[in-house]
Image: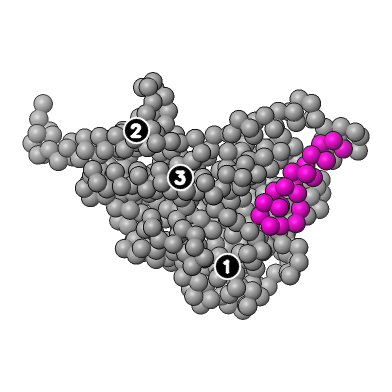
């Protein structure tokens, strides 16, 4: 629990993470010493390129890929756009139909909507509703039923950024392969937090980024399969032909070094960190449900598992709705506890969470939800502080809204 009343307790690690000091240390030499352009032919350029090549190999190995299958981008949003629009806008695509899920991040839904305005046909699939222990989970059979002869791409998130549900990508991939359809996966919230291997999942394209795993902002990657099948994309950024023409632009060398370092650290600590975060998350959930009435869990049950033994929910994710509480007032009452009411990228949107609405929550219940994203720098004291702050705020706000109307309007 913070001793300084102004000290921030940060539990919004799905939005972004603090850069690990070890990552900062790895990046610094590439800001003021090895600062050459990796595309230049002189020695400074060669040194930078060698560092990029080593980092690319490290990142590829971390997800079971080949180094040539990694395309560096500015982040997961660009990676998603390159994957989705890159497949759909290529001349020799299979057709104009794309399949996705209603609970995807806006970085997937918005490119799909843009394609739909241009004449493409987009199918958004529903998920298990909030009364289910697998709330938010996508039944692979829905994907099988949605694929058509003109389907050019299926895109399904691996782990949801709001409710933490982990989707059965390997099962979905098997369906896509049997129908000859490419599969893209937004793995932004999954890489570095659960085991992710592109060959085990058998996916064709995968987006991920550094700033969700204690690395810097402004650097991400897209995995693009190079065999069985060879995936070809229409570039979305042109101007120099870098990265085999798939994404032009001078490479962000310090960012790439930081990305590789951050991912390596996550994998080194993964088994123990998964257990630690799950324990902290479960303690937080147990206290909130014990000390408050009318609290609803948003997303799959905390103890629910998958067929391969993994949890059905990200270890550090908790999303709960507090009935009879104004959501905006609740968020403002958090003070120096940093949590969110949904995706950070849609925080300016006055509409309730589209994810929770897709699970069947009412607008009021969706607005009254808080998302907790626990991470590397959280501990038991932080959890105790969060419990105290949330319980106090919910109880106080409920008292305010339960006053008789005459008392509320009297002077």
Graded by Cα atoms within 10 Å as few (under 14), some (14 to 19) or many (20 or more), the crowding at tag 1 reads some
Give residue 28's quadrant in the image: top right
Estimate the x, y position of residue 121 in percent, counting from the top left.
56, 69
Mark closer to the chain start, 2 or 3 = 3
Residue 323 appears in view:
no
Looking at the rendered structure, the secondary structure element under dot 2 is helix
How many numbered discs?
3
| Residue tagged 3 | 277
Q: Is residue 315 left or right of residue 57?
A: left
The magenta-colored residue range is 46-67
Q: Nearer the viewer, mark 2 or mark 3?
A: 3
Which quarter of the rendered picture does the C terminus lie within? Answer: top left
Query: What predominant SS class does the magenta segment belong to?
Result: helix
Q: Which residue lies under the disc numbered 2? A: 385
> Residue drawn at (38%, 55%), measured in percent from left and top?
302
Disc 3 secondary structure class: helix
Element under label 1?
helix
Across and down, in percent, residue 74 comes to 66, 43
Q: Is residue 186 above or below residue 175?
A: above
Query: Which image quarter is the N terminus in?
Result: top left
Image vertical order of residue 104 relative to residue 122, above or below:
above
Label drawn at residue 170: 1
Q: Are marks 2 and 3 in contact (CB under 8 Å)?
A: no
Residue 177 left/right relative to 32 = left
Where does the image place residue 379, in percent across and percent down from the top left? 43, 36
Viewer-proximal residue among 261 and 146 = 261
| Among the two numbered marks 2 and 1 on one chain, the one whose residue lies closer to the N terminus | 1
């Amino acid at each position: 629990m913070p001793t300084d009343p102004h000290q921030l307790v940060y539990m919004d690690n799905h939005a972004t993470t603090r850069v690990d000091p070890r990552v900062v240390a790895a990046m610094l030499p590439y800001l003021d010493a090895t600062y050459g352009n990796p595309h230049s032919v002189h020695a400074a350029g060669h040194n930078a390129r060698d560092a990029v090549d080593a980092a690319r190999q490290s990142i590829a190995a971390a997800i079971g890929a080949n180094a040539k299958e990694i395309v560096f981008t500015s982040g997961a949003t660009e990676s998603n756009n390159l994957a989705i629009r890159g497949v759909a806008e290529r001349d020799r695509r299979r057709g104009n139909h794309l399949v996705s899920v209603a609970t995807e991040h806006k970085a997937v839904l918005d490119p799909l909507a843009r394609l739909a305005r241009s004449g493409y046909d987009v199918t958004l699939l529903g998920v298990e509703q909030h009364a289910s222990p697998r709330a938010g989970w996508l039944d692979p059979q829905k994907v099988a039923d949605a694929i058509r002869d003109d389907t050019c791409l299926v895109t399904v998130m691996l782990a949801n950024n709001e409710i933490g549900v982990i989707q059965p990508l390997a099962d979905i991939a098997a369906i896509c392969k049997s129908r000859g359809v490419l599969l893209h996966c937004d793995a932004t919230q999954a890489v570095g937090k659960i085991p992710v291997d592109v060959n085990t999942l058998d996916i064709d394209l995968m987006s991920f980024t550094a700033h969700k795993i204690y690395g810097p902002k402004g650097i991400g990657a897209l995995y693009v399969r190079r065999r069985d099948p060879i995936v070809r994309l229409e570039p979305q950024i042109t101007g120099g032909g870098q990265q085999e023409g798939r994404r032009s632009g001078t490479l962000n060398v310090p960012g790439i070094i930081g990305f590789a370092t951050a991912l390596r650290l996550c994998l080194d600590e993964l088994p123990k960190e998964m257990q630690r975060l799950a324990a902290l998350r479960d303690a937080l959930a147990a206290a909130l449900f014990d000390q408050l009435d009318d609290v609803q869990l948003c997303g799959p049950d905390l103890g629910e598992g998958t067929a391969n033994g993994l949890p059905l929910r990200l270890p550090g994710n908790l999303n709960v709705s507090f009935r009879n509480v104004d959501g905006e007032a609740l968020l403002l009452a958090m003070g120096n506890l940093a949590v969110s009411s949904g995706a950070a990228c849609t925080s300016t949107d006055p509409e309730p969470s589209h994810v929770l609405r897709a699970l069947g929550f009412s607008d009021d219940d969706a607005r009254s939800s808080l998302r907790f994203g626990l991470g590397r720098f959280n501990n038991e004291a932080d959890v105790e502080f969060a419990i105290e702050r949330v319980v106090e705020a919910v109880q106080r706000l409920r008292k305010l809204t339960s006053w008789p109307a005459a008392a509320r309007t009297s002077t």
